[in-house]
Amino acid sequence: MRRSKEDTNETIRLLIETAGQVFTRKGYADAALEDIASEAQLTRGALYHHFGNKKGMFHAVLESVQKRIAERILTESAQSDDVWEQLLLGCRAFVTAAVEPQHKRILLIDGPAVFGWEVWRTMDSQNSVRLLHEQLQLLEREHILQPVSVDALTPVISGALNEAALWIAQQPDEKQALADSMTAVSLMLNGFKRNV
């Protein structure tokens, strides 16, 4: 009997979720496909069928993390009707989500190490960076930004947020490091805001 598309999608979802837990716990290098298949209560054949190999599995997990963080940015920034406040909330949401235990190792440590920064940046540009760029375009249209190229400003802010997340992840007091980083990010962003 042929499996339905819903069954296939559920298998893929389960494998990505389970693999995310295994990669978070063990790291990419020490995670085995057998562990993922066993914890998902599926065969290794199912994993190979859908993802090809360990790197393919990890790519799907990293992509899933990137998408979840983008969803968080949308949710958090929607808490305000003020477009400038939305920018600040979105930046905070990115950094906060990036350093959470279920994301930190996959997003900040193993992702760049396994795929290199170019692949990592491509994924980021389709998710968080895309949202940042759209928000900056909105601020530009509403004449809230200083005269500056949004195309140039987007990687500047994104780079600062990525570096802040990497720094926070290494601090013993992540809560204080997040607060300190967001103070610095707010001061930086205010330099791009037009005085009205």
Image (tube, helix red, strand yellow):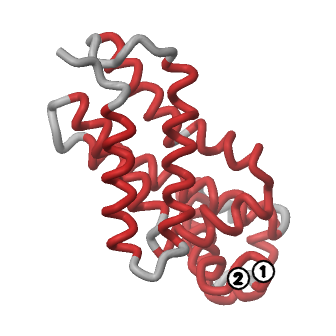
Badge 1 amino acid? Leu
Q: Which corner quadrant of the image does residue 83 belong to?
A: top left
Q: The C terminus appears in which quarter of the rendering?
A: top left
For the residue carrying disc 2, how many other residues have a C-alpha within 10 Å: few (<14), some (14-19), or many (20+)? many
For the residue carrying disc 1, how many other residues have a C-alpha within 10 Å: few (<14), some (14-19), or many (20+)? some
Vertical comparison of 160 with 32: above or below: above
Q: Which corner quadrant of the image does residue 34 belong to?
A: bottom right
Give residue 33's mark.
1
Q: Looking at the picture, tell me which residue is in the foreground, 75 or 187.
A: 187
Where residue 82 appears, as percent x and y from the top left, is 17, 30
* Label 2: element kind: helix
Q: Looking at the picture, tell me which residue is in the foreground, 81 or 11.
A: 81
Q: Looking at the picture, tell me which residue is in the foreground, 38 or 9.
A: 38
* Label 1: element kind: helix
Left or right of 13, for residue 88: left
Where residue 11 appears, as percent x and y from the top left, is 60, 67
Q: Are marks 2 and 1 in contact (CB under 8 Å)?
A: yes
User: Which residue corresponds to the image point at 36% horizontal and 35% vertical from the top-left?
Assistant: 189
Vertical comparison of 177 with 33: above or below: above
User: Which residue corresponds to the image point at 57% horizontal and 79% vertical from the top-left?
Assistant: 21
Q: The N terminus appears in which quarter of the rendering?
A: bottom right
Give residue 37's mark.
2
Give residue 60's mark.
none
Badge 2 amino acid? Ala
